[in-house]
């Protein structure tokens, strides 16, 4: 049984420790005793065929999955040692510390600057100078400042797709998260925009921990430090990306990465 392997080798406590995580949509068992440790300042790629539970796992990690009626979760996810499912967890704060980027860039129909200011305002920031400086630092963090600084009052929805995706990442960065969850962040982008987002991810991991879902094996191999292969709700194999692609331990992983099914 390879499920539950930890791909952890940094010698410090993991930022996330997922243990025996089960998730049900009604009677449907969507995550089956998933266990994995996530190292700080690493990029983890979740791979596996459509419907295997990748998005469900991401959504469980910031408790977006709570919102689904009839769903049930059990097991434990320790975030910096504290169970995210524990009584008394502040979910708004949790989602500030663990932010999510989606497949389709979803900026608000507001100005570029107001998109960035939105999160800090929700969390109570009112100081105009602080907000303006967050706009600059967040746009710098995603490599957008130089190109957008003279049109901060333009509608964010008029930006190009990859700029919109960067802006959505900047919007998270503005509330100072620790973990960025990215659900197929490049799947609607062209190859050049995709490479630029991958480069951004490598830059961001200096300050954040990234868990990303991708359908693109090359992307997982290029960008991630660790990869987890999922199949029908099970985490079949989880290890260093170089190992999983060159020497998978489980035949099902081997079949998937060599393109036998998908
Ligand atoms: N809201 C939902 N209600 C019921 N079943 C769902 C719901 N969302 C996802 N599922 C099912 O859970 C399984 C995993 O879905 P998902 O996590 O979206 O997979 P992936 O992201 O790997 O494609 C699929 O079989 C899917 O049909
Ligand atoms: Mg998905």
Image (cartoon, grey):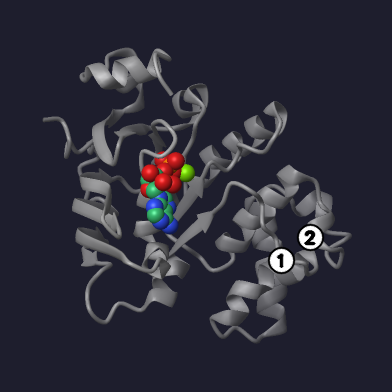
Residue depicted at x 77% and y 64%? 112
Q: Nearer the viewer, residue 211 or 8?
A: 211
Tell me where residue 237 sits by quadrant. top left
**Which element is circle 2 on?**
helix
Where does label 2 land, which residue?
156
Q: Is residue 212 visible?
A: no
- In the rendered image, residue 133, in percent from the top left (x then y), is placed at 69, 70
Query: For residue 108, which numbered disc appears in the image?
Result: 1
Q: Is residue 195 above or below residue 130?
A: above
**Which element is circle 1 on?**
loop
Q: For the residue carrying disc 2, how many other residues have a C-alpha within 10 Å: few (<14), some (14-19), or many (20+)?
A: many
Q: Nearer the viewer, residue 79 or 230?
A: 230
Q: Is residue 200 visible?
A: yes
| Alpha carbons under labels 2 and 1: distance apart | 7 Å
Q: Is residue 237 above or below residue 132?
A: above
> Of all residues shown, which one is farthest toward the left?
1
Q: For this view, does 156 lie left or right of residue 227? A: right
Residue depicted at x 54% and y 69%? 175
Q: For this view, does 233 lie left or right of residue 120? A: left
Sequence-wise first label, 2 or 1: 1
- In the rendered image, residue 261, in percent from the top left (x then y), is placed at 40, 19
Q: For the residue carrying disc 1, how many other residues have a C-alpha within 10 Å: few (<14), some (14-19), or many (20+)?
A: some
Q: Is residue 252 above or below residue 44?
A: above
Question: Is ligand 2 within 8 Å of the beta carbon of the residue shown at mark 1?
Answer: no
- In the rendered image, residue 192, in percent from the top left (x then y), is placed at 71, 28
Residue depicted at x 65% and y 74%? 118
């Amino acid at each position: 049984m390879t499920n539950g392997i930890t791909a952890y080798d940094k010698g410090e406590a993991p930022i996330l420790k997922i243990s025996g995580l089960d998730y049900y949509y009604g009677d449907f068992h969507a995550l089956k005793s998933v266990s994995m440790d996530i190292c700080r300042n690493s990029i983890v790629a979740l791979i596996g065929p459509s419907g295997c539970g990748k998005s469900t796992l991401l959504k469980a990690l910031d408790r977006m999955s709570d919102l689904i009626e009839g769903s049930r979760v059990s097991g434990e996810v320790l975030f910096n040692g504290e169970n995210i499912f524990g009584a008394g967890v502040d979910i708004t704060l949790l989602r500030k510390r663990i932010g999510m980027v989606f497949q389709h860039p979803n900026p608000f129909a507001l100005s570029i600057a107001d998109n960035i200011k939105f999160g800090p305002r929700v969390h109570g920031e009112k100081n105009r100078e602080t907000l303006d400086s967050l706009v600059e630092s967040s746009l710098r963090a995603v490599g957008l400042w130089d190109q957008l600084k003279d049109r901060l009052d333009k509608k964010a929805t008029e930006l190009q797709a990859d700029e919109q995706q960067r802006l959505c990442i900047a919007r998270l960065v503005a509330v100072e998260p620790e973990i960025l969850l990215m659900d197929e962040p490049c799947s609607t982008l062209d190859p050049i925009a995709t490479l630029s987002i991958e480069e951004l991810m490598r830059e961001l991991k200096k300050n954040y921990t990234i868990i990303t879902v991708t359908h693109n094996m090359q992307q997982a191999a290029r960008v991630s430090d660790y990869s987890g292969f999922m199949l029908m709700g099970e985490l079949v194999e989880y290890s260093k990306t170089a190992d999983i692609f060159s020497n998978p331990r489980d035949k099902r992983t081997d079949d998937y990465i060599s393109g036998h099914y998908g």
